[in-house]
Amino acid sequence: MRRPRDAEFFRKHVQTGGANALALYRELARWSEERRLGLVRMLGERTFLVVVAPPDLESAHRIFSVMNSRGLDLSPTDIFKSQIIGALEDAQESEDCARRWEDAEETLGRDDFADLFLHLRMIYEKKRAERELLKEFPTQVLNQYLPGKAEVFVNDVVVPYAEAYAQIRDARYEASFGSEKVNAWFKRLQQTDNNDWRPAALWALRNHEHDPVWLDRFLKARAWTLPRSS
């Protein structure tokens, strides 16, 4: 799916009528007639259109990754985005949700944004993953929002949880009082040698953001149940 923020580049270099044709014409004009005829013969005799119809989403992802090995890898979150944004019928709503999704991804960075979806799966399912994210997330999470509530998933899940993830990662929780204790727990928890605490911390911050006293107690309890890093 083309990113809205790339729309101007795409319009100028791909969609503008005649631009590509003119560039091709200028290049071919430099060729000899024999070379141009060779190109025509090659296109007519050795060029084929191959239609690939994978049986499921997992196969489509694997095929794309193999065929697109020189480009940016297609992550599961890219596929989830296409499903969510594609479910929105209103063009303006689709563009707005795509922008908010991309802003959240840029805030976290591609790797942390992908990790966020692993934690979201845990929050919703309340147990460890048994299969890869691409197989479990649609049935365990997305199906609760598709069809009909795609915008809710962006506005009430992706955006606020991405912000919560950034606050935890950067220890920059803010409140009128008590934020120092909460941020101290975030820093301490990040010193552990696993991420088992992150889904719980994300859920807590998302649902009790305005209660630093509750967060302090909750994070303290989580910290004392986790093994210390060596």
Image (spheres, rainbow, N blue to C red):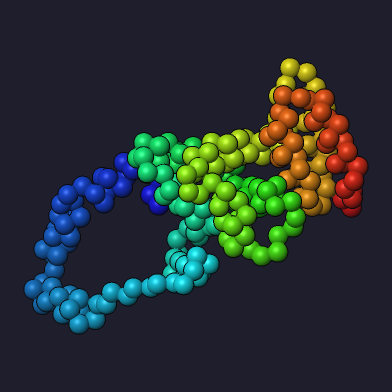
- State the count of labels: 0
Q: Is residue 207 above or below residue 179?
A: below
Q: Is residue 53 visible?
A: yes
Q: Residue furthest left?
A: 33
x, y percentage for residue 71?
Answer: 45, 61
For residue 40, side relative to residue 9 (left or right): left
Q: Residue furthest bottom?
A: 45
Camera-nearest residue between 89 and 227: 89
x, y percentage for residue 48?
Answer: 27, 77
Residue occupying the point 20% across, 76% down: 43
For residue 167, side relative to residue 8 (left or right): right
Residue occupying the point 26% across, 45% down: 12
Residue occupying the point 28% across, 74% down: 49
x, y percentage for residue 190?
Answer: 78, 43
Q: Is residue 102 visible?
A: no
Camera-nearest residue between 14 and 104: 104
Camera-nearest residue between 41 and 208: 208
